[in-house]
Image: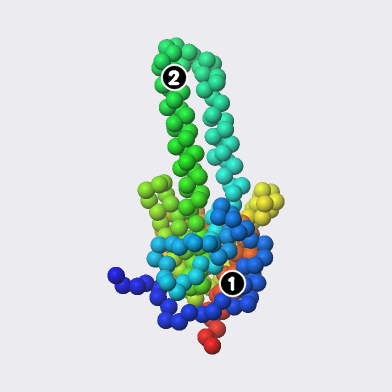
Amino acid sequence: MPEVFKAENVKAESEEIKKLLSGGFSGRSFGSCVPRPHKFRFEAQQDDETVLLLGRRHLVTNLRWITMLCFAFVIPFVWGEFPFLKALDGNTLVSVTMLWYMGLIFYGMQSFLMWFYNVYIITNERLVDVDFVGLLSKTVNVAQISRVEDVNYTQKGILASFFNYGDVIMQTASEQRTPDTVGEMSAFTFESVAFPDKVAGVISQLTEEAEKPWK
């Protein structure tokens, strides 16, 4: 199988990048922004490629589906308030309740897995955006660091400002639109990632270094 994105030489990590990665990020596996994740590899990663930053949506963005799950959990306790359910016999009502909770378990697991595996990866060579659409379909966007032309970030709303998360937007030399990017500002938008200012700083520094001649 031919190798893709193979670098002929490996550029050493600069002091600026080390400094950016050493401050303020979460080092936990379930963190929203993990520098140099331990024992982490992704599909098509090269042997000489180093993962500098692993990001995903901020943990607080899960509050919506968690709140819905908690609300749905207590609904069976008031089955008696629904006339069409009140008419069911005991065995049928038990079966409906079991199906309801099985559906909630599936919904909760799917929502968690979608959050956990929809990741943004920054390596010393490229940017990788992995987006799962359901559990059986995914889209992977890839851009070389050297092709990034502009980086900025936005924070909207009280929660984003309070918990310090936002969207990091990268403009590349050749933008490619994919179905999962509908509604996003560019083909590379790291949505609701923690520490957007620091993430944008790391990408900007990598882009600046990519433009310099190797020593």
Category of crowding for the residue at label 1, using alpha-carbon neighbours closer than 10 angstroms: few (below 14), some (14–19), many (at least 20): some
| Residue at image mark 1 | 204
Q: How is the image coloured?
A: rainbow
**Spot occupied by residue 137 in the image (x, y as percentages of width and height):** 38, 51
User: Left or right of 165: which side holds 213?
Assistant: left
Q: Which of marks 2 and 1 precedes in the sequence?
A: 2
Task: Identify residue type, mark 2.
Answer: Val
Q: Which quarter of the picture shows residue 141?
A: bottom left
Q: Residue at x 57, y 69 (%)?
A: 203
Q: Residue at x 40, y 54 (%)?
A: 138
Task: Identify residue type, mark 1.
Answer: Ser
Front label number (1 vs 2): 2
Which residue is the extreme one toward the front?
Answer: 39
Query: Quadrant where the N terminus lies?
Result: bottom left
- 185 or 43: which is nearer to us? 43
| Residue at image mark 2 | 94
The span from disc 1 to disc 2 (Cα, nearest Å) is: 57 Å
The reply to whether the C-beta atoms of the residues labelled 1 and 2 are less than 8 Å apart is no
Please determine whether, in this image, residue 152 is positioned above or below residue 71.
Answer: below
Q: Residue at x 40, y 17 (%)?
A: 92
Please determine whether, in this image, residue 128 is positioned above or below residue 191.
Answer: below
Category of crowding for the residue at label 2, using alpha-carbon neighbours closer than 10 angstroms: few (below 14), some (14–19), many (at least 20): few
Q: Which quarter of the picture shows residue 34?
A: bottom right
Work out whether residue 124 can be spotted.
Answer: yes
User: Left or right of 69: which side holds 92?
Assistant: left
User: Left or right of 68: which side holds 44?
Assistant: left
**Spot occupied by residue 22 in the image (x, y as percentages of width and height):** 65, 67
**Spot occupied by residue 37 in the image (x, y as percentages of width and height):** 54, 62
